[in-house]
Amino acid sequence: MAYSTPTQDMPGKIREVTIGTGDTAVTVGGETALPFHGFEGDTPNKPAIAIEIQDIAPSNWPEALTKEYGDSVNDPAAWAKKAAELGADIVALHLAGADPNNGDKSPDEAAEVIKAVADATDLPIMVLGCGNAEKDAEVLKKAAEVGQDKRIVIGPATQDNYKAVAGAALGYRQNVIGTTPIDVNLAKQLNILLGNLGVPEDMVLMDPSTGGQSLGYGLEYSYSVMERDRLAALQSNDEVMQLPIICNVTREVWKAKEVKTSEADAPEWGDQDKRGILWEAITALSMLVAGANVLIMRHPESIKLVKSAIDELY
């Protein structure tokens, strides 16, 4: 007797969001099935990978990571070019130096860096704030202005600053990242608030903060929250939740003790370089299976592994 694979039709559809312009523009979303379930519906756009660069040289990255980028970490424009060479779909510029506790760069100083990065690469650009809601409202407004006509992404827009960030995105027709703690209801609430401000749904990426939970550090909880986000969008046809998901895989992965501890201190853990690569790659793949459409990553070898898996699964 012939075997027929059981399938489940989903009534919902994830909206498409386009980042960038021209030949290098990236479109994510559009699926009518759960992640990698192409046999059950449409999965028209592969997940995209953004390589994180910073406006200042990172002081807390392990050597296993910084050595991959060499002197380019001291020049954001050169770093952006390096990211393009390493296979990035998107360049994610983290304005770490705007943090009031880490340089407190002004919006105008941030604008200079953004312009230099934009001039250095044709890839789509994502501008990420420092994590201070008040300061991010200022610098992201400037980022939206500098990125005019480039269809960049700015974020995070949080409960504390979403009006200012969303207003900047609307004013300059930029995409915005709505970021909430790991909670389905909070994510839905922020999506509603952004919609009430008039932000079109094809300009919003949803960041449920799940990518911040790396392998072994709350990954199960993060995975289940993302899974519920996708089921709400696809199975329950909840239009408010039908937005592409972005996961910043880097936030916690490269702070994990299993990644930062040297071989001399923990010889039983094996090669430190391989540890970091696999830690990031496995975390990233878990987020993809849970429903991520965009990943922010750091290590070139991790990115190669993940891209290979995406190609094979598609």
Image (cartoon, rainbow, N blue to C red):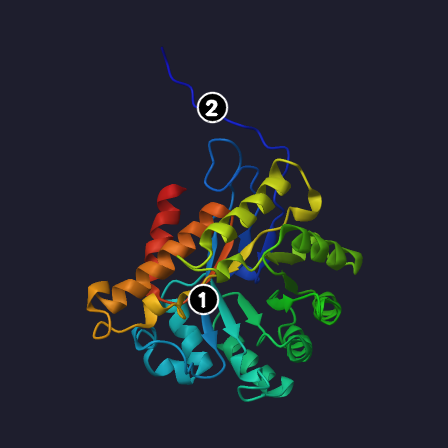
For the question of whether residue 282 can be seen, the reply is yes
Location of the N terminus by quadrant is top left
Kindly identify the amino acid type of the residue bearing the numbered disc 2: Pro
Determine whether, in the image, residue 297 is placed left or right of residue 273: right
Residue 101 sits above or below residue 17 on the image:
below
The one nearer the camera, 276 or 25, is 276
Q: Which residue is mark 2?
A: 6
Label 1 crowd bin: few (<14), some (14–19), many (20+), radius 10 Å: some
Kindly identify the amino acid type of the residue bearing the numbered disc 1: Glu
- Viewer-nearest of discs 1 and 2: 1
Residue at x 49%, y 47% (from the top left corner): 290
Residue at x 26%, y 74% (from the top left corner): 262
Residue 160 at x, y percent in the picture: 71, 70
Report how many numbered discs are placed on residues in the image.
Answer: 2
Residue 232 at x, y percent in the picture: 63, 41
Residue that lies at the very extreme toward the top in this rendered image: 1
**Numbered badge on residue 252:** 1
